[in-house]
Image (tube, rainbow, N blue to C red):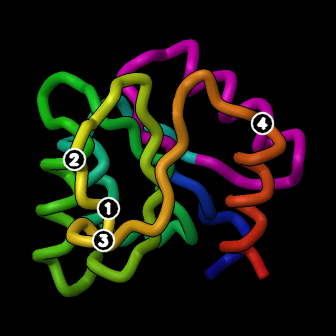
Amino acid sequence: MPDHEPSILIVDDDADIREALGDVLTDHGYQIAAVRNGREALTYLRKGARPRLILLDVMMPVMDGLTFRREQMQDPELAQLPVLLISAGHEAGLDLQALGLTQMMRKPIDLNQLLDAVSRHHR
């Protein structure tokens, strides 16, 4: 991946959260891109961007995170991009394994936990 290409894609409808996560990650040396919903994320990725990690909110207008993930998994070009699900809600019974996910973080986000998760995708 070229050094100038963002390595983390933040997908969240809340501008304050996008900005705060972007600031923290940028301060730790990561290059980020941010979009407002799953539809914008798919458009961004289908233009050729290949971040090392997608930070994906669950509840968003236009296209929510779970719908995005299902569409992402059906696209052979995008299916293997790792996703860290972030949610303020309580998705009872959500099958992370069926979505190809190993971890979900709850809002408010513990920044140390977030940085640890992000660093695992940048080795």
Q: Which mark is residue 93?
A: 2
Q: Position of residue 44 (x, y in %)?
A: 32, 54
Quick one: label 4 or label 1, which is nearer the N terminus? 1
Quarter of the image that includes the C terminus: bottom right
Tell me the magenta residue range: 10-32
Residue at label 3?
97
Q: The disc labelled 1 sits on which kind of residue?
A: Leu
In the drawing, does residue 19 fall left or right of residue 102? right
Tag 2's secondary structure?
loop
Label 1–label 3 contact, CB within 8 A? yes
Q: Which mark is residue 96?
A: 1
In this view of the protein, which residue sits in the foreground, 15 or 115? 115
Graded by Cα atoms within 10 Å as few (under 14), some (14 to 19) or many (20 or more), the crowding at tag 3 reads few
Q: The disc labelled 2 sits on which kind of residue?
A: Gly
Q: Which mark is residue 119?
A: none
Instruction: Kindly report the distance in space between the C-alpha atoms of the residues bearing marks 4 and 3.
Output: 24 Å
Label 1–label 2 contact, CB within 8 A? no
